[in-house]
Amino acid sequence: MTKIQLYDTTLRDGAQGEGVNFSLEDKVLIARRLDEMGFDFIEGGYPLSNPKDTEFFQRLAKEPLKRSRLCAFGMTRRRGVKAADDPGMKALADSQAPVITIVGKTSDFHVAEVLRVSEQENLDMIAETIAHFIGLDRQVIYDAEHFFDGWKRNPEYAAQTIKAAADAGAMLIAMCDTNGGSLPEEVARITKEAAAAVSIPLGIHTHNDAELANANSLASIDAGAVQVQGTINGLGERCGNADLISVAANLMLKKSGYEVLDPKQIERLTELSGFVYEVGNLLRRNNQPFVGPSAFAHKGGMHVHAVNRVAESYEHIPPESVGNRRRVLVSELSGRSNIIATTTKLGLAEDPALMNAVLEEVVRRENEGYQYEAAEASFALLVKRLADQFTPHFELVKYHVATESRGGAALTEATVKLLIHGADGQDQVEHRVAEGDGPVNALDGALRKALSGRFPQLREMSLVDYKVRVINSEAATAASVRVVIESRDADGETWGTVGVHENVIQASWEALVDSIEYKLCKDAAGS
Amino acid sequence: MTKIQLYDTTLRDGAQGEGVNFSLEDKVLIARRLDEMGFDFIEGGYPLSNPKDTEFFQRLAKEPLKRSRLCAFGMTRRRGVKAADDPGMKALADSQAPVITIVGKTSDFHVAEVLRVSEQENLDMIAETIAHFIGLDRQVIYDAEHFFDGWKRNPEYAAQTIKAAADAGAMLIAMCDTNGGSLPEEVARITKEAAAAVSIPLGIHTHNDAELANANSLASIDAGAVQVQGTINGLGERCGNADLISVAANLMLKKSGYEVLDPKQIERLTELSGFVYEVGNLLRRNNQPFVGPSAFAHKGGMHVHAVNRVAESYEHIPPESVGNRRRVLVSELSGRSNIIATTTKLGLAEDPALMNAVLEEVVRRENEGYQYEAAEASFALLVKRLADQFTPHFELVKYHVATESRGGAALTEATVKLLIHGADGQDQVEHRVAEGDGPVNALDGALRKALSGRFPQLREMSLVDYKVRVINSEAATAASVRVVIESRDADGETWGTVGVHENVIQASWEALVDSIEYKLCKDAAGS
């Protein structure tokens, strides 16, 4: 077995991604999680570039990582100064990180056109910067920028740059496909040529601009690289870095002869992926390989049928091996197999007339803009209604919600009047008012006030996400909107509900009511 | 040059993706666009599976495609019946599509466990189905399902299935990596072995479950396949199909010796990608290779600096070659280079004090949840304000917006009272009311009524998209929300604005006001 080191740069290269904005706390949380899972190296940031990164290293110096080695990232010294006099070197040394990652130029084109120094000065910058940190008793990883492009232009000079790094004491050369434009066959060939040029280990750092970051990482490892640099969920500038989740899963589950993480930790990859999205408050990529919510979701009727018969027929690995799960989606394309899978879960008998009614209703509602794929609770209620198994716990008489702004402060107030059906057949009217931070929050508050006397268990349920999508985007604010709400109760179960209406308030109301009715049905069935 | 055929299955396999739901009109629009761009084959659907697909083929029979060949998709005949008696075969024949694509089993495991027929019966099903359509004067493409998995298990039987298809008259065998779990080295090796087994051309059909759909397509083509099947934007079940955009761009722009589309059409790939997202009302993947809005967006200060010096330093291809464009993002990480790029565009002189003020304000606002990456108009206003170059055209005195629901109907009314600054120094008060389909629509209506006497040019501007995002998702409806509005005016220019507030109404108001102020500034500068 060959040990392949995982070098995570979510906190540095990942933070360069569009829309990515980690707070200091976010960075610490992610570093602790990666440490706990046994990632070999964690690149924490670029201390010179912003005060947040400087503070991050101070925090970790006080309370160091347990298993992972912490890396601070920086560039080679500036031209014409001594390494010891360069403020960048000082910031790196002050970070107290045990590993310093230094990026330098490989390509004679970049040396001449971007750095604008002589080829010899570039070699000196690399060697002196690395020697400086070796002198300070740090380990040094050398990131060879534009490595493959440089090697293709001028392999002799490119080889000199990494030899300078190796001779100066670097522990490893990371070959960076900085622009993300290399092809796997090039990466494999040049990895072998580089391995012949230096005697220290090689790593691979890829970007996804040609949709080949994962393939290029695997190709380089097959050709001899022993470290892979990347980010969780493939975050990163432009099209992102290699997704360490995909690379690790491929190496451990699909290829043979490689050791990456403890197999128990591979089962936590789905959790890790979700954790980084949540902490960074980022939109999930549903169809992300291995760990996305759609990665083992079956929609085509033919597929659903076969998956029910033999799981591996449409699954390349068992979903559990990466901590994911199989899902069967409800959609007009899916045919009866999907609906049967759902109704069976609800404990209903197979009934062809019900199947037809459900299928017809789903098609009708999908045409209006409903989507049940993320709203399994609303779908369950729809099936129960059509099966005559549903009695609503309450009915709306009216609601009213108003927001007023005057002098910068916005105030929202909602009133809700409900008819609540009692277990004894006695109905009661509740009319309540609540303020809120916005219309949906105020409506939710008034609705709960009206219901919580009769249904105290609603106190243990909360809304965890709220999404609004314009359905016909050409008409914008006058078009239909789809609202999806995710709720969670005390035992950690989450469920999604959906509402569609021209008016976002009414669509939100629909989704709120479904969420509460689902919770009440669920508790009634469980008791 | 080797001609590689593009076989698009966006309308069939792509429609299996979670959240994908094409209407009949959507399907026709997409087919016409692909036809216009010269895709070789367009798979329109699975006529037996749903009435929408049946209708689609009727529409295209009346008004056929001009350049592309239309394909109808179906399975081999059922076991134990004659092809002519099978309703699936009849639906395919009725489609009038010139090409019939038949999917059949390659793997002895699936023959035994899923299909539950003898190995010989499976060969007969393949041969008789294909012969049936050859007899009806159609061309037949044979999709060999689970091809690579089947070949790895039992290469002799797998070879028999494709020989049966070739002998029956199929024009091409498409090797399907149905579960998406194969590795490039396996795909390359098995493609060569399959090419030795049959004398008709081979195609490749991959899925992205191991994040290798693109790499596997390229590996198979390098090994001899001459057709690639995939979808626009990689839509498709689970993790999606191969993205034909990435495959075509790689073959045309990065590899040599292949001919795919007319080079003029490669420049339309970004437009095509956006078109399919818009028509299907799907969320774009911002960091999509080649054509995503982030694909050539630069955020890291070091990168921005270098890109301004030499474009190719951080770009693997010129963005224009696929119809995309370079963007410089505003963010705390980016340093001064990014801000200078934006202020220069606004015609402001380089001023270090202004740079500092902007940087500080951006950092402060990003901490509150603002994101300027999709809100360039709000950022321009922020810079103008800090440069003392901005005088608001109007001020809010108060607004009030209320939604009431009673008996199922939801009514929304908004009032807006503004102080409007006249060009002559005279202020005027306008107090207006409007109804709307929701609170933002009603506020927008009242705001325009109040302003349009003084600023008639606002009539030519409209809102084209409206997005809401909860920023701290744990607190849901009580958390801050970010609203992003996209507006467009008569000459087609679009601009984004952002608002952040605990109250979605107030956040929307902020973004609405920025959008209108931006339009008024822009027109004033242009006049």
Image (spheres, coloured by chain):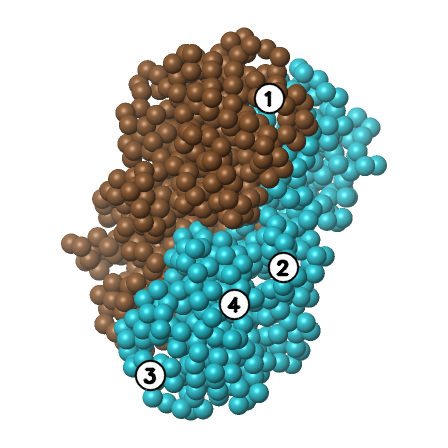
Chain colours: A cyan, B brown
Count neighbours of disc 3 (C-alpha within 10 A) and say few if under 14, some if 14 to 19, many if 20 or more.
few
- Asked whether, in this view, residue A504 is left or right of residue B201, the answer is right
Residue at 57 percent across and 43 percent down: it is: B181
Q: CA distance from mark 2 to mark 1?
A: 38 Å
User: Where is residue B481 drawn, in percent x and y?
Assistant: 51, 53
Q: Give the percent coordinates (x, y) of residue A5.
A: 60, 66
Residue at the spot of label 2: A258
Number of numbered markers: 4
Q: Is residue B305 left or right of residue A430?
A: left
Evaluate whether label 4 is on the same chain as label 3. Answer: yes
Q: Nearer the viewer, residue A424 or A513?
A: A513
Q: Residues within 10 Å of mark 2 (few under 14, many from 20)?
A: some
Residue A120: mark in rendering: 3
Q: Which amino acid type corresponds to the residue marked 1 in the rendered image?
A: Asn
Which residue is the extreme one toward the top?
B85
Q: Which comes sooner in the sequence, label 2 or label 3? A: 3
Residue A128 visible to the viewer:
yes
Residue tagged 4:
A203
Vertically, is B231 above or below B186?
A: above
